[in-house]
Amino acid sequence: MARDYFSFMQFKRDKIQLLNGKWDFYFDSLDSEKLKINVPFVYQSKLSGINTDSIHDVIYYRREVDIPEGFNENIILHFDAIDHEAYVYIDDQLVISHTGGYTPFSVNISPYLSDDKFTILVKVIDPSFDKSIARGKQTWDDKPHDIWYTRSSGIWQNVWLENVHDIHIENIKYHPDIKRKSVNIEVNVSDNAIGKTLVMKIKGRYHKYHIDNCKMNIEYLVEKLWSVDEPNLYDVVFSIEDDYVYDSVSSYFGLRSVKVFEDKILMNNEFIYQKLLLNQGYYQDGLLSASSDEDFINDIKMMKAMGFNGCRIHQKVEDPRFLYWCDKLGFLVWGECPAFYEFSNKANDDLKKMWDEIIERDYNHPSIITWTLYNESWGIEGVNDNKMIQDAVIGLYDHVKKLDSTRLVIANDGWEVVKGDFIGFHNYCHGRKDETEKYQQYCHDLADIDALLKHQPGNHPILASCFPYSLKPIILSEFGGIAYQNSDGWGYTSVNNEVDFLADYQRTIEAIKASKLLCGYCYTQFTDVEIEQNGLLTYDHKPKVALEKIRKINDMIDA
């Protein structure tokens, strides 16, 4: 059964057609055996219908497509994510290539069409052992190991067609202004739309604007702000018209602010204590790809039911449909870019390009409040005293802040923080229940600023040499990792029954509660993933203990 949800709910036209489902598939060359694959699931996953961990750096997809009825003028072919390097052919003509496994790209295929049907061929190159490309948690060894998992090669998000008029809306951006309790709406249109009318329908009212420029700016006053407790969203439809409707796009927005004040993080000018879960976005049958819309909805509802108000997406650029449901249901998100593991100027330039594409894609989601650029110095080893690497990391931080000043940014989360709007550090040293001295040290390290800064997770300093301490918010952005229920996997500590698990979880939260330094935490992790068995849920997203028991412990700290 083909996956049937559309991801881009903030920019949606009526004439779209998903191309998910059965495609022809080939390993290594087009001369190899023709298989069938269920797009958008990678061949390493069960849901793909192939389900093999064999290593292939080159793969091919092919499908014949009938042009949908009513599609004319500009037919746009969209790929929401292909890992890693893609070459797209229409009827044997190369129409576009794209590098980077986590961001969308598209092409107008109309100039290449000569019939009422056409053939798509996609060649994918995914270097299995290359540590210089952004691969996140995908292993670069023969087999998964430790905290690195099965590869995800090729198409892993939606493929779809869209029909677009020559006169059209190109993109929409919402810029929040809490002081004025308004949103500045930036609508970019095609050159030939000048002289037409831009119509904005919101809350049942129509607002009309003469288009005299390709970039239109509209200020709209907002009555209600977006927050976790009240995720107020405004549905809006934009169209370009005169006596004819040339283009129409449905969208939505929510208005919120996030900023730092001394050692606190404020949302809508009020202190918010962040209770986050590390969410790697893996699914037992689909790997990086959810099988259905319900997967996202259920995940968010379970995280909220456990008393968390957000998640840190870890080493993955999550499907926009997940972000849509976070917007709708009121759930905070930290966005993160997958890491490369060998530094080079090219690797860093590729990462910068990916961040351009991430922010272009996700800028309008009110649920996203933080961007995490690097994690635990992965790919930037030596950053503590290597000025060249420090300058590259600081340069990326400055670049992202320039692109998006509405969110917090941390350049390197976990340790060796090079630059950031807050300090995010990792500490898994809570110890077993019989390691009382280790636990006492853990409590002390969380509660005393000097001890916190002297602690060296992974033998790395919390702050890099170029980033001296000053008053900032501090978040324990990874901790816990308690394994329970599976003796074949591992965690940072482990227990073998529910009573001990809840007691250990409560010990970690009590230590956080006792600290006056922290303004939030992120527990590792939401679900088990392959051999890493330290989730609150199993790999098939089933709770290990009753959700309300976790909530009761989390509720010990006021949000």
Image: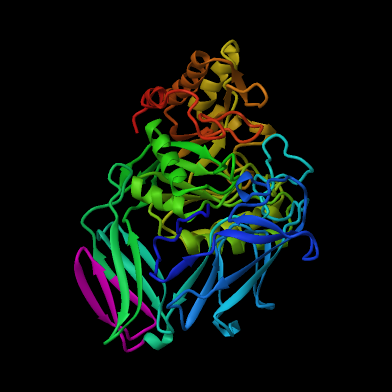
In the image, residue 106 lies at what x, y percent?
A: 55, 71
Q: Is residue 204 magenta?
A: yes
- Camera-side residue of 496 and 404: 496
Q: Is residue 220 left or right of residue 158?
A: left
Asked whether the viewer can see residue 399, the reply is: no
Q: Is residue 461 left or right of residue 197?
A: right
How many numbered marks appear? 0
- Camera-side residue of 126 and 518: 126
The C terminus appears in which quarter of the rendering?
A: top left
In the image, residue 39 lies at what x, y percent?
A: 59, 57
- Camera-side residue of 143 and 464: 143
Picture residue at 42% right of the left edge, 86% below the top: 191
Q: Is residue 214 magenta?
A: yes
Asked if residue 14 is positioned above or below residue 297 in the image, the reply reads below
Magenta span: 194-218
Residue lying furthest left? 205
Asked whether the viewer can see residue 77, the reply is: yes
Asked if residue 448 is positioned above or below residue 497 in the image, the reply reads below
Give the main secondary structure, helix, strand or loop, of the magenta stretch.
strand
Quarter where residue 85 is shown:
bottom right
Q: Is residue 372 left or right of residue 143?
A: left
Asked if residue 544 is positioned above or below residue 19 in the image, the reply reads above
In the image, residue 148 lies at what x, y percent?
A: 68, 40
